[in-house]
Image: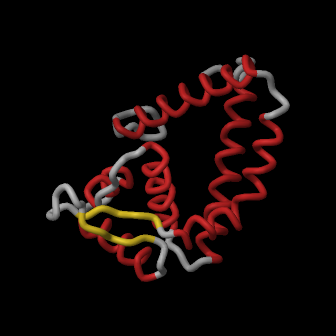
């Protein structure tokens, strides 16, 4: 990639934002006695609630790229802390569903709420067309990073 490309400052800025969010997540984990995987699990579970996805341990394991034992350990930790609960699916009693407890949502908002509020205020300074451009860009970046991860690319670009 050409470092002189006018797009590279945007790539570096996106990386800096990613690092800052990662540091915030690590601080949240440390303050609440969580493993970094536990924070990622909570994020996936909260996203599942927003999208209407019925989250099962198998689904969560796929999202986290963990085997069954690793997923069980993460769910056990979150359940012990009162952040997640297991329940039986009423449509299929054999299936276990994972539900985020109100305590997890409150902890998340208490910690991340201020930065989310600042991001919302910043976004409100953009018009609808600009927001659509940002959404398209971030969606494309998300797709590219997801494909790279799914393809097993290493940092040198070799599979």
Q: Quadrant of residue 15?
A: top right
Residue at the location (49% across, 47% down)?
Answer: 50
Scheme by which the image is coloured:
secondary structure
Q: Position of residue 97 (x, y in %)?
A: 30, 62
Instruction: Name the quarter where the N terminus is drawn.
Output: top right
The C terminus sits in image quarter: top left
Q: Can you name the residue that lies furthest to the right here?
A: 125
The answer to whether residue 52 is above or below residue 36 is above
Tell me residue 142's x, y (percent).
Answer: 52, 34
> Viewed as shown, does residue 4 lie left or right of 55?
right
Residue ranking furthest to the front: 90
Q: Viewer-proximal residue, 156 or 84?
A: 84
In the displayed structure, would residue 31 be above or below residue 59? below
Is residue 35 shown left or right of residue 152? right
Q: How many marks?
A: 0
Where is 86 relative to 121, above or below?
below
- Could you say which quadrant of the image residue 71 lies in? bottom left
Residue plotted at (38% across, 70% down): 74
- 7 displayed left or right of 67: right
Nearer to me, 57 or 9? 57
In this rendered view, identify the residue nearer to me: 73 or 151: 73
Q: Position of residue 83 (x, y in %)?
A: 48, 73
Can you give x and y, in whole percent of width and height, for residue 151 in the image? Answer: 34, 35
From this view, report whether residue 18 is shown above or below residue 25: above
Residue at 58% from the left image edge and 64% from the top image edge: 105
């Amino acid at each position: 990639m050409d470092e002189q490309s006018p797009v590279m400052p945007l790539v570096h800025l996106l990386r800096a934002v990613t690092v800052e969010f990662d540091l915030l997540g690590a601080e949240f984990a440390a303050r609440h006695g969580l493993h970094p995987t536990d924070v990622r699990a909570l994020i996936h579970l909260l996203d599942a609630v927003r999208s209407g996805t019925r989250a099962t341990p198998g689904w969560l394991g796929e999202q986290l790229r963990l085997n069954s034992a690793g997923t069980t350990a993460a769910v056990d930790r979150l359940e012990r802390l009162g952040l997640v609960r297991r329940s039986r699916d009423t449509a299929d009693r054999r299936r276990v569903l994972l539900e985020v407890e109100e305590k997890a949502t409150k902890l998340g908002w208490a910690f991340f709420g201020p930065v989310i509020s600042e991001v919302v205020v910043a976004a409100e300074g953009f018009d609808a067309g600009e927001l659509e451009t940002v959404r398209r860009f971030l969606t494309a970046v998300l797709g590219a990073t997801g494909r790279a991860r799914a393809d097993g690319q290493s940092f040198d670009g070799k599979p």
